[in-house]
Amino acid sequence: MQITTEDIKVISRLVHDLCGIVLDESKGYLIESRLSRVANEAGCETFSELYYKTRYKQNPAIEKKIIDAITTNETLFFRDTSPFEALQFKVLPEMIDEKANSRNPKRLRLWSAACSTGQEPYSLAMTLAELIPDIHSWDVNILATDISSTAIAQASRGTFEKLEIQRGMKPTFLAKYFDQTEGTYRVKDQLRSLIRFQQINLLQPFVGMGPFDIVFCRNVAIYFSAEARKDLFERITQLLTPSGCLFVGSSESLLDLGSRFTPHRHCRAVFYRPRMAQTAPC
């Protein structure tokens, strides 16, 4: 199925409305490669027909397939390494010290805001478990969310193929935190119990969420418009604890969002404490 200029315009509009991703005229190849199968399965002869069938017949099943196809992103365990090192050796030790005399010294709340098929939240859970040997006596919860219900379902199962495991996983962690079953690897229940999975569209209001000590929102806002990106990080900031930390992708910077997003650097990683910046100089 070949794509036309008009197809690109209407599909780009539809994708933006569904999940906030901005596609310009140069992304025709991406639309064609990822949505041809969806269009064929929906009985559409053109991409414009797919647009009208989705938009005006309000077909949730087609919407779901479009979201799943467009938001399939690259992911691996401990992606970029340095954010997890900064978390383990800088952010978490300081945060635990700060909480020592608080009402809830063993309470930690984390959010993996675009968790895809689960590698990031499981990496966060392993990082916590390595730092806190008695973690199951703590009040710890990692919220893992994604717009794709298919990705969330896969992440929740915690089962990975050998190729997925080999990308970023330390052999010692594989032996410690996974069980091998019939050629696949499944996250052990004790580690899995630290994580709660939920489907969430980052463009919609965050209802009943937070506060979070740490938020990982990496490599997703780069696909949003400037306005949607700014709005997203402003809303995430409101969910952070006063000294809470925000991690974004290695190629992302929030300097254009104002002085409150002053970067902190450790282990070659950059993170932000936007609420702390309002009350104390960095």
Image (cartoon, rainbow, N blue to C red):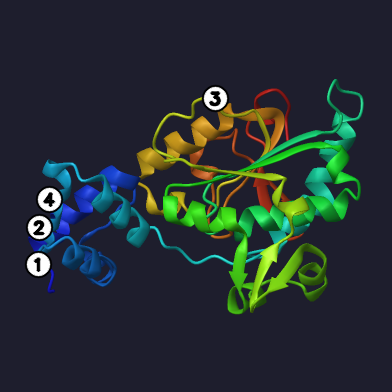
Q: Amino acid at mark 3?
A: Gly
Dot 2 or dot 4, earlier in sequence: 2
Which one is closest to the eye, mark 1 or mark 2? 2
Near-viewer residue (152 or 265): 152
Dot 4 or dot 3, earlier in sequence: 4
Badge 1 element: loop
Q: Which residue is mark 2?
A: 48
Figure check: 28 above or below 241: below
Left or right: residue 140 compared with residue 223 = right
Dot 1 or dot 2, earlier in sequence: 1
Where residue 72 sits: x, y (%)? 41, 62
Q: Residues within 10 Å of mark 2 (few under 14, many from 20)?
A: some
Q: Residues within 10 Å of mark 4 (few under 14, many from 20)?
A: some
Q: Which residue is mark 3?
A: 208
Between the residue at mark 2 and the residue at mark 3, the CA separation in whole angstroms equals 38 Å
Where residue 267 sits: x, y (%)? 77, 59
Q: Which mark is residue 4?
A: 1
